[in-house]
Image (tube, rainbow, N blue to C red):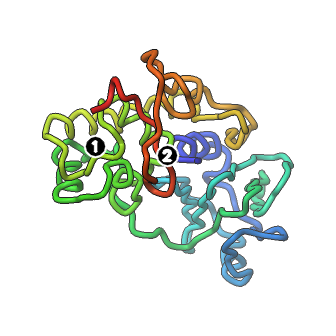
């Protein structure tokens, strides 16, 4: 958290005001991020026009005229604030018309000039059952871990991988390479569907309110989850946790609906 939908919602809010604006300054605020960019690297972007805001997976990309992009990753608990001041501010961008800051209590956010290697997004037009089948083929790792590996599939994290597997009727601990063609087809469809639905609902704001959009508004997707963070699934059955850790944590699933 935040995952692809939360970054896309933030981009949609920010783009009308920032695209075409001029970046005046950007700086890390003390005590900074877990990974700080150098002040010299940030200073190179001063005076540059913001050409476009785009997104890749969980990364917000601020594309500049005549300069490398400014790439923001919100870590585990970060959010972006437009024209306001919030607690735990770690990074500030000032333009001719706006102030943008990243609030990040856990300090795992970071600023980059280059994107890491990322896989295909489930909402990409090229993502299909065949694409996902090629990704999973021969792999022994749990399917949930593979969905959350950003080098393979970009944008899914714990929330939406959990929801996609529930909608597809697949247990998170099953080996990715052991899924049938029908299961892969269902999973490819559910991955795209849960992400698009979450974008439409403004992202997921959970009880800790870690995510709010740049204008401070909560998203409604958290209220629509079927299994994530619940004891009883939307199906009415008690949920369970996997016995072993998957991607560093135990995974929630419905023993009645998921096979």
User: Real-space Cα distance between discs 2 and 1?
Assistant: 23 Å
Outermost residue toward the bottom in this view: 40
Q: Residue at x 22, y 43 (%)?
A: 128
Taking the spot 42% from the left edge, 34% from the top edge, the residue there is 253
Q: In this orientation, which residue lies closer to the viewer: 124 or 211? A: 211
Dot label at residue 158: 2
Q: Which mark, by number, is residue 125?
A: 1
| SS at badge 2 | helix
Q: Nearer the viewer, residue 219 or 227?
A: 227
Q: Left of 94 or right of it: where is 72?
A: left
* Front-lying residue, 247 or 167: 247
- In the figure, residue 204 lies in which quadrant? top right
Sooner in the amino-acid sequence: mark 2 or mark 1: 1
Asked if the residue under mark 1 is in contact with the one under mark 2, i.e. CB atoms within 8 Å, the reply is: no
In the displayed structure image, the side of residue 19 where residue 171 appears, left or right: left
| Residue 45: % across, % down | 66, 73
Side (left or right) of 208 relative to 16: right
Counting labels gives: 2
Q: Secondary structure at mark 1?
A: loop
Mark 2 vs mark 1: in front: 2
Residue 68: x percent and y percent? 54, 73
At x 57% / y 64%, what residue is drawn? 71
> x, y (%) of residue 32?
78, 69
| Residue 35 in view of the camera | yes
Res 101 seen here: no
Residues packed near mark 2 inside 10 Å, few (<14), some (14 to 19) or many (20 plus) = many
What is the quadrant of residue 92 in the picture? bottom right
| x and y, in percent, of residue 67 in the image | 57, 74
Q: Badge 1: how crowded within 10 Å, few (<14), some, or many (20+)?
A: few
Q: Which mark identifies residue 67?
A: none
């Amino acid at each position: 958290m935040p995952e692809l939908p939360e970054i896309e919602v933030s981009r949609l809010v920010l783009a009308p005001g920032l695209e075409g604006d001029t970046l005046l300054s950007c700086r890390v605020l003390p005590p900074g991020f877990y990974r700080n960019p150098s002040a010299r690297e940030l200073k190179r972007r001063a005076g540059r026009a913001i050409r476009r805001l785009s997104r890749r997976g969980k990364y917000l990309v601020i594309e500049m005229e005549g300069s490398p992009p400014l790439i923001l990753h919100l870590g585990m608990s970060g959010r972006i604030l437009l024209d306001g001041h919030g607690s735990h501010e770690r990074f500030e961008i000032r333009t001719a018309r706006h102030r943008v800051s990243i609030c990040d209590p856990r300090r795992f956010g970071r600023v980059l000039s280059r994107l890491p290697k990322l896989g295909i997004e489930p909402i990409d037009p090229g993502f299909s059952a065949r694409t996902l089948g090629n990704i999973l083929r021969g792999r022994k790792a749990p399917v949930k871990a593979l969905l959350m590996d950003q080098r393979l599939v970009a944008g899914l994290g714990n929330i939406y991988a959990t929801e996609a597997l529930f909608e597809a009727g697949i247990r998170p601990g099953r080996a990715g390479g052991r899924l049938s063609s029908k299961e892969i087809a269902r999973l490819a469809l559910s991955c795209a569907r849960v992400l698009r639905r979450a974008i439409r609902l403004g992202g997921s704001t959970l009880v800790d309110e870690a995510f709010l959009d740049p204008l401070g508004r909560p998203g409604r997707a958290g209220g629509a989850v079927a299994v994530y963070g619940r004891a009883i699934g939307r199906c009415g059955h008690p949920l369970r946790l996997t016995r072993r850790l998957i991607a560093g944590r135990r995974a929630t699933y419905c023993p009645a609906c998921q096979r």
